[in-house]
Amino acid sequence: MASQASQKKVYPEPLGSARDELRRRVRVRIAPSPTGFAHVGTAYTALFNYAFARKNKGKFVLRLEDTDVKRQVKGAEQAIYDGLSWLGLGWDEGPDKGGKYGPYRQSERLDIYKKRVQKLIEKDLAYQDEGAVKFKSKFKSKEKVGWNDLIRGKIEFPASEVGDFVLLKSNGYPTYNFAVVIDDSLMKISHVIRAEEHISNTPRQIVLYKALGFDKPEFAHFPLLRNEDKSKISKRKNPVSLSWYKKQGYLPGALINFLCLLGWSHPEEKEIFDLKEFVEKFSLGRVRKAGPVFNLKKLDWMNGEYIRKTQNVKLKTQIFEFFSKKYSEEKIEEILPLVKDRIKTLKEFESLAGFFFKARKPKPGIFEKDYKKHIRALIKTLENTESWEGKNIDKILFGLVDKNGFHTGGFFMNLRVAITGSRFTPPINESIVILGREETISRLKSILSN
RNA sequence: GGCCCCAUCGUCUAGUGGUCUAGGACAUCGGGUUUUCAUCCCGAAAACCGGGGUUCGACUCCCCGUGGGGUCACCA
């Protein structure tokens, strides 16, 4: 409803002039290294890059930085594809997809780096040293190297900070700082959007752009996700593997939404929105500079919200798949309305509704008083009940309470515990309707026989 | 330690000099609905790191402290 003009808070996007923008097509990338599982930090980086690319009608490139031979892990590459795909963060070019600036695995670009390093040696900008090739830095004492960061503004380092550093390792592989500059240049990356941990690498890279005769791209450094103690997010202190979130039963849309709100805020202060809306509203100007603490409490709430707004037919399928088709879709669909408001993750379906599929013995002592009396009366009544249908069950149960003068709360709790083995359950009347007459009576009887 | 980045409720955040007795969300606590647990609804408590400037006026701008973080590899 609000027109563009009425939105006062328009942040200037520091992208240079509109003409610059047209001249330079937006191309962004993420460059994970396949050294383990797919990391939530990779997803976070991908999210911002994806949004920036889509928003600006540009391309989003996936490049694998597999230059650390020792830390290479076998399924890591696939895990990255799976994780990003699960979240709906699709890329336009990559090792699996190809593209005209490939190859997209650095291990397949070794000859490119060698050629470039050779040129640097010829120009006396690099030299051999113990089997490696190092960059030769030569700066005047007061020189500065800096850039205008799209998120942080002007950042400057004393050029003296850029010492000589290795470009090509003795095993023929490039170092990160060298490969990243060559690849970003050759792949025509226009905006390097990455976490703030890379700020201190940037001076070296800028120096290299110049030495290699490339234009430097724009840089934007967003904040780093933090542990509770504010240190950089880590495996030790947080679940960081994307597959963990999937296994816990978080919905990809909820995880994405949660990540969106870390370091960025919706211009209308909305909390719940999808990836499409994020792309529409995204701007680097709304990215905060301070590192957000990664706290799952809000994700739990958000996931519950997403579960509640998912259509039953869809949610049914998700639960069916989540539990590897262990429970029948028909049964899940029947139970769903009873549990939808009560679960925060797909995984919780089992703890809440598992009793439908398998009887659970109540722990002794969790019954209310008179439970045997209640159960005996129940069995007697239910055995004489023909119509096993919601309205009738309600009528019969309340009638029973009335007739015998049972304490209502105690009576229903005892029925609940006898049937489900728990005091926290979906609505019990509706549950026994689904469970069926035979199973219900059988479970009640088994309580008395113990 | 050098260099660099950062600083609003417990947490995520709004805020770009006056609209701030600082707004929202999660979490927490209290209440309502309810045969449990949830959902839902209502309410409460909870923050501008400190000190100097600039200004008629600073949460907002500048400086200095303090605190936190990142980075200083033939890791990325």
Image: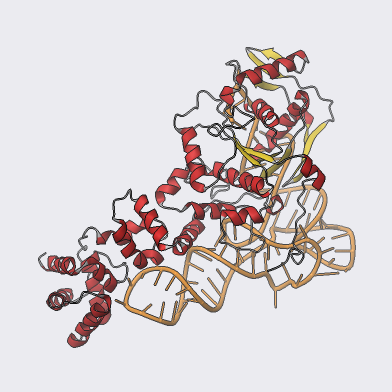
Q: Nearer the viewer, residue B6 or A188?
A: A188
**Which quadrant would the C terminus of chain A be assigned to in this image?**
bottom left
Q: Residue B19: x and y, percent?
A: 75, 72
Q: Residue A284: x and y, percent?
A: 70, 50
Residue for point 21% across, 68% down:
A436
The image quarter containing residue A187 is top right
Where B68 falls versus A200 (above or below)?
below
The image quarter containing residue A112 is top right
Position of A363 with respect to A186 (left or right) is left
Q: Which color scheme is applied?
A: secondary structure
Position of A45 with respect to A325 (left or right) is right
Q: Nearer the viewer, residue B29 or A258?
A: A258
Q: Is residue A5 visible?
A: yes
Where A197 falls versus A177 (above or below)?
below
Q: Residue A251: x and y, percent?
A: 46, 53
**Which quadrant would the N terminus of chain A be assigned to in this image?**
bottom right
Residue for point 57% across, 28% down:
A105
Position of A436 with respect to A238 (left or right) is left
